[in-house]
Amino acid sequence: MSSTLKETVGRYGIWSVGLRSEDPSRRGELAEAAAELEQLGYGAVWLGGSSAARNAAPLIEATSRIAVGTSIQSIWQYTAAESAASFAELEQAHPGRFLLGLGVAHAKNTAEYSRPYSALVAHLDALDAAGVPADRRLLAALGPKTVELARDRAAGSIPYLVTPEHTARSRELLGETPLLAPELKVVLETDPTRARTLARDYLAMYLTLPNYTNNFLRNGFTESDLTDGGSNRLIDAVFAWGDDTQIRTRIDNFVAAGADHVALQIVDGNTREDLPREAWRNLASLLA
């Protein structure tokens, strides 16, 4: 199934919080946007935040091919039984279209947070018992132990806010077969000051979350890289910005490091709920 999964999601996808919206008045807008992403050639849509199968269903119904995955569904917000039931319902209606991306989220935002690795293992055990196949679930894996868990108990890894170097290390741990689909933030801006300002504004929230800052430190950054909104070195490592050639090169760096698929998130200074459709079209053009 893994090789088929790689073919299904293709080389590039779109990561978006806005496409997760449950506002009934936006249902038509979301369906239209998903259909256009499919037409533009993207292989997958990744629903940001703590998303679920119910968020994926309208997008799947509005399209015929594109895969839709959660990135991520928090193991603290949804029980394994709830996840299994919603997976089975969507799988019956639209076989092979939904991917269950799982993660442990963050202690800062989760009152129940405790022993996250053990909790994730127990959650996977419960999903096994409920019949959710390992080859249709993915883990947001940052540390080595979780990457190995993604190799052994899932179809692969969908890490967020990482570098090509982290991608290369993940590839070594995963081996050749599992899917490796890192997220990458893209700023369609050529002016360095403007691009880095947009990036720093967006990164600020993540620099308060130990899961990410610890991963940066584990991967060669220093405490000084994490201050004042992030050093240029950090910004340039986790964002793609510049002209078309520079952005395409940065994306290609992740592929060269071992990524099978890159989930691209537009950062433009608008709210996370915005649908940057013109930017998605521009990005598709430079990837063509």
Image: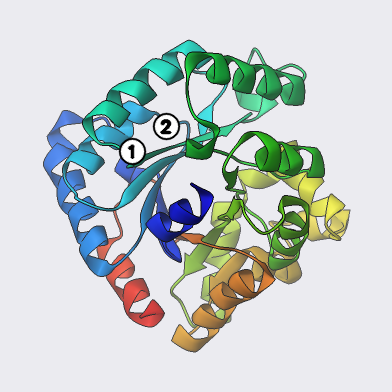
Residue at 71% across, 45% down? 142
From the top left corner, tell me how far across and down residue 129 is, in percent.
55, 14
From the top left corner, tell me how far across and down residue 232 is, in percent.
71, 71
Please name whichever residue, 65 or 252, is drawn nearer the observer in this view of the structure: 65
Tell me, what colour scheme is on the image? rainbow
From the top left corner, tell me how far across and down residue 94 is, in percent.
24, 36
| Left or right position of 103 against 83 | right
The image shows residue 27, relative to residue 129, as above or below, that is below
Q: Which corner quadrant of the image does residue 279 belong to?
A: bottom left
Q: Is there any visible trace of residue 34 in the rendered image?
A: yes
Q: CA distance from mark 1 to mark 2?
A: 7 Å
| Residue named by callout 1 | 20
The image shows residue 24, relative to residue 1, as above or below, that is above
Given the image, on which type of amino acid does mark 1 rest? Arg
Please name whichever residue, 217 or 195, is drawn nearer the observer in this view of the structure: 217
The image shows residue 102, relative to residue 143, as above or below, that is above
What is the secondary structure assignment of the residue under circle 1? helix
Q: So how many labels did they put on this image?
A: 2
Given the image, on which type of amino acid does mark 2 rest? Ser
Q: Earlier in the sequence, mark 1 or mark 2?
A: 1
Q: In the image, which disc is placed on residue 218? A: none
What is the secondary structure assignment of the residue under circle 2? loop
Circle 1 residues within 10 Å: few <14, some 14–19, many ≥20: many
Q: Is there any visible trace of residue 269 in the rendered image?
A: no
| Left or right position of 105 against 168 | left
| Left or right position of 148 against 156 | right
Q: Which corner quadrant of the image does residue 176 belong to?
A: bottom right
| Residue named by callout 2 | 51
Residue at 77% across, 59% down? 172
The reply to whether callout 1 and callout 2 are in contact (CB within 8 Å) is yes
Circle 2 residues within 10 Å: few <14, some 14–19, many ≥20: many
From the top left corner, tell me how far across and down residue 78 is, in percent.
49, 17
